[in-house]
Amino acid sequence: MRNILGLAAVCVLLSLSASMAQPSYDLVIVNGRVMDPETKTDRIATVGIRAGKIMAISDRPLQGARTIDARGLVVAPGFIDLHSHAQYAFGYDQQAQDGVTTALELEEGIYPVAPFYAVRAGKTRINFGASVGLQSIRVKIKTGIDEEGSLNAPFATWGKILPRKAEWAEQPLSAAERARERQMFADDFASGGLGLGLLLEYLPGAGRDEIYLLLKDAGRLKAPVFVHARASERADANNLMAPIQELVADAAATGAPVHFHHIGSKALDAVDMVLDMLDGAAARGVDVTTEVYPYNASSTAIGSALFNPGWQERSGSRYEDIEWPPTGERLNEESFARYRKEQPGAAIIRHNMPDASVTAAVAHPGVMIASDAIVYIDGKGHPRATGTFARVLGVYVRQRKALSLMDALGKMTLLPARRLEGISPAMRHKGRVQVGADADLTLFDPATVIDRATYQRPTLTSAGIPYVIVGGVPVVDGGRIVGSAYPGKGIKSGG
């Protein structure tokens, strides 16, 4: 009998030993400096990840199927980019290596959104999503064309529709077309679009009354509105305020949440006054937010309405401020007219923002960081599509000391998540390093992280970001893209 009991005891011990030897987590991150902007946690801890979620943050050892030693690295929430046009395979990889785990097309948006989400399901490195784009709706109404957004040729219709811009950008809509426009927005928002995207500077035919009624719909639906504000008449403080004031007033009157894109390029040297206005509106209950990218040059299509006659006065820039990416040349009146006619869909780089204004916006409390990432053509374009987030950490935090590391992380993670979590429950679990949050994490070295992309070599990936994890799956591992990893998911409204 004693032998049987002894054997049973041995079996129990062996069973317990085997059980204890089994990894409790899919992935364990050890020795990292865990930083969470919401709780202000900043400590060395071990993070245990299981089934795509953070399941433990502990001072004790944890066992996992794989362990990453993050000694010397910050373990931060994955960066959330509210303003990325780079919704294609190469663009996702570039942004992943800059620490981005969620990239959203909210300013331009697209219509219809269902195909946009369907073509990416199970095929993206990072999380993705889009608003319902007013521009795309107008293109559909006026031309019958659906804008494309494939993984390899994003928004390929630009070259086709820009020569026909008068039909959808510069002409007012009839009463029947406006009714159709509003219905198209409401239907696509219901099918998962992340609010309404308004490219107003590119749509001079969009009336103020038309936009007000769309914001009334957005307010009723509690849909956020993402705005590229109208062009100012002149690039001085008196005129730069007006396009922002239009949407602040509409937000106050309709209850629609409004987010202003790239405040650096829209406010120029009036940025302090514009930010003061937005702060004052927010303090009085108006739901307005904004963002900036950390560069003093912008980029857009040369054939767009932004360059209609009078653009120099409206933007405060000259021909020689415009760079042609394929050659690096600065333009003159003749070359500008030629490229605008022959290649209207091609992007230019415009060097016209005061550096002090950009720094002020980057450092300003509550201003989010977003890239306005563009599509590269033959490896040419703006470096913001590759280096935005590393540039903030390396240049503005470490070198210029314009803001603290914790504040910078909040601008890249928590604040963007909060901007959307009212309509997208998925965002309530992002932008944090907390138990129960999604395991979207960026691990970077605060002493070496830096952007390497330049205007001449814009696709050089960022340094100092060795690991990026999406849904518990490393997509950047040892500084390299994991070619077989496609854990990205669509972020939608509703649910």
Image (cartoon, helix red, strand yellow):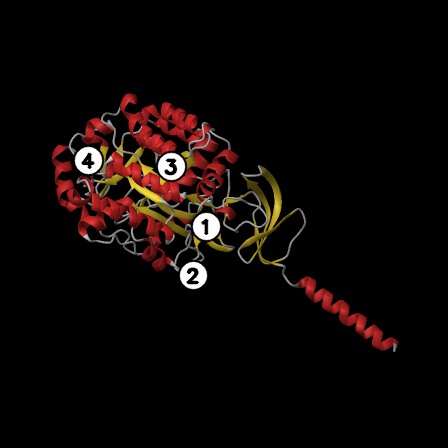
Q: Which mark is residue 54?
A: none
Question: In this picture, is 121 found above or below 141?
Answer: below
- Residue 125 sits in quarter: bottom left
Mark nearer the N terminus (1 vs 3):
3
Give, as a three-letter code, the residue at label 1: Gly
- Would you name the residue on which mark 2 appears? 484
Question: In this picture, is 18 found above or below 278?
Answer: below
- Would you name the residue on which mark 3 appears? 258
**Is residue 110 among what the camera can see?**
no
Tell whether 481 sits left or right of 155: right
- Residue 255 sits in quarter: top left
Tell whether 52 sits left or right of 129: right
Locate the N terminus and report the quarter of the image it occupies: bottom right
Give, as a three-letter code, the residue at label 4: Phe
- Would you name the residue on which mark 1 appears? 479
CB contact under 8 Å: marks 3 and 2: no
- Would you name the residue on which mark 4 appears? 307
The answer for how far apart the CA atoms under marks 3 and 4 are is: 25 Å
- Residue 359 sits in quarter: top left
**Is residue 369 among what the camera can see?**
yes
The answer for how far apart the CA atoms under marks 1 and 2 are is: 15 Å
Q: Residue at x 15, y 32 (%)?
A: 309
| Viewer-proximal residue among 225 and 101 | 225
Q: Residue at x 13, y 37 (%)?
A: 337
